[in-house]
Image (tube, helix red, strand yellow):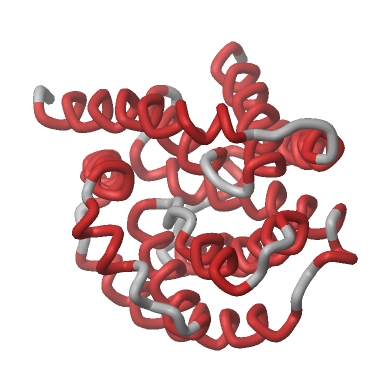
Amino acid sequence: MLNDILLGLTSLITSALSAVTGVGGGMILIGLMPFFLPSLAIIPVHGITQLASNASRAWFGRKDIIWLPFKRFVIGSILGMVVFGILIRFVKLDLIPLFIGLYILLLQWSSIFNRLIRRFESFVLVGFLQTGLGVFVGTPGPLNVAVLNRHYSDAHQVVATGAIMMTVVHGAKVLVYMTLGFVFYDYWQLLVFMVVMATAGSWLGTKLRHWFSANWLKKILPYLLTLLALKLIVGIVIK
């Protein structure tokens, strides 16, 4: 019960953070989940929670959604779900926390890695890559937001469009793990609680976004994420 409460509160806070900044919340959430859940459950539970978080954030900001890049993103996402959904069947799921930790470190500190993934200007390619990464590491990072920011200057449009894109990514991720045989019903109480808290966080963050700048939050996120990533990696290595 204590674990469920802590995960629910974390879902609330990280969902609000994403609604304010557009990035970071989902990555913090998945960085903390290995401390509360078995490896097999991390990505499926995270997928349901983030599906609710992003869908609610998109709904609350629906008037700001830009539909053309979203339609292109969906095409790539479907392709990514099929290709990476097949590949994940050959991966040892106990290593998921290690993949998450390494990915977070690369995303935060490797300029080469970031330059490589940010060359994908096409929203079709972005959808393919983000969905594929989501299947393996849960949260694929703010690639779509980075590309949206290069095309659109309105922060509300970027956050809302990015949210509906990530709704597709997490929905695809849930479908993949359903085909792998994950039993979501075993975690139904936790899922309901986290979904409610994620939705509340989206509402709260959407309101807060109109009141203050989140630049200081973006500055400390890399350091917080790095600590979480190192903890995940060490936990796998010393097993």
Q: Residue at x 36, y 26 (%)?
A: 223
Q: Position of residue 168 (x, y in %)?
A: 62, 69
In the depicted structure, whether residue 56 falls above or below residue 208: below
In the depicted structure, whether residue 51 falls above or below residue 23: below
In the depicted structure, whether residue 117 falls above or below residue 109: below
Left or right placement of residue 144 versus residue 203 in this view: left
Rendered image quadrant of residue 204: top right
Q: Residue at x 86, y 37 (%)?
A: 207
Q: Quadrant of the N terminus?
A: top right
Residue 21 seen in the current view = yes
Q: Nearer the viewer, residue 171 or 26?
A: 26
Q: Position of residue 112 (x, y in %)?
A: 19, 59
Q: Residue at x 55, y 18 (%)?
A: 3
Left or right placement of residue 34 versus residue 194 in this view: left
Residue 196 seen in the current view = no
Q: Nearer the viewer, residue 93 or 181?
A: 93
Left or right placement of residue 94 versus residue 55 in this view: left
